[in-house]
Image (cartoon, helix red, strand yellow):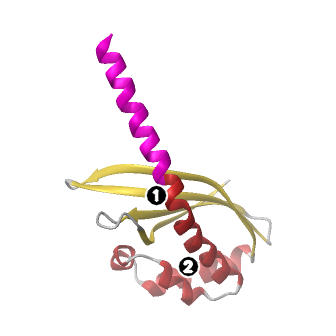
């Protein structure tokens, strides 16, 4: 019985800690994603490159990001609305290194009628506990 209470206390502590981190990181991430969608609405696709993290840009050529966004705009039309649906915080171990990820998921409606679910992943900086630029951007259809 004592073990069960101990494990429950640990789980509650971890969930509270994650919930607090979500609340703390949401404003910074929302500033980045708001600017991202603002750039898309203004058709400033090249400007979006400044919002991505150095880790993302090391794996993905910056010009391919703006080209992809421009193609999406040509195919789906303009962004009509982008509504934040979910925030998340998780800790993952990759190649022996712990990464703390903060995610935001948006429901995006385009002028052509396309509706997508778009997820932004940010990595939390180990030193100052802030988030940098967009680490990953994933688009899915509803």
- In the displayed structure, 136 sits above or below 86; it is below
Residue 125: quadrant of the picture:
bottom left
Confirm whether the magenta stretch covers residue 115. no
Residue at the spot x=41%, y=57% of the render? 101
Residue 95: quadrant of the picture:
bottom left
Residue at the spot x=71%, y=81% of the render? 41
Q: Residue furthest top?
A: 1
Q: How far across and down, in percent of the image, does residue 21 sit?
A: 46, 53
Q: Please state if 5 lies on the left or on the right of 18 as rendered.
A: left
Sequence order check, earlier mark of 1 and 2? 2
Label 1: few (<14), some or many (≥20) within 10 Å? many
Which residue in the structure is indicated by mark 1?
102
Q: Please state if 37 lies on the left or on the right of 56 as rendered.
A: right
- In the displayed structure, 89 sits above or below 130; it is above
Residue at the spot x=68%, y=53% of the render? 142
Q: Residue furthest left?
A: 96
Q: Which element is circle 2 on?
A: helix
For the magenta stretch, what is the residue range? 1-21
């Amino acid at each position: 019985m004592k073990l069960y209470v101990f494990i429950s206390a640990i789980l509650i502590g971890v969930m509270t800690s994650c919930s607090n981190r979500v609340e703390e990181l949401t404003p910074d991430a929302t500033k980045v994603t708001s600017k991202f969608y603002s750039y898309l609405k203004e058709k400033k696709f090249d400007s979006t490159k400044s919002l991505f993290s150095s880790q993302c840009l090391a794996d993905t050529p910056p010009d391919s990001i703006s080209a992809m966004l421009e193609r999406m705009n040509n195919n789906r039309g303009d962004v009509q609305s982008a509504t934040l649906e979910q925030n998340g915080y998780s800790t993952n171990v990759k190649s022996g290194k712990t990464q703390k990820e903060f995610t935001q998921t948006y429901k995006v409606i385009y002028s052509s009628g396309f509706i997508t679910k778009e997820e932004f992943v940010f990595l939390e900086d180990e030193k100052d506990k802030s988030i940098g630029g967009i680490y990953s951007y994933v688009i899915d259809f509803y």
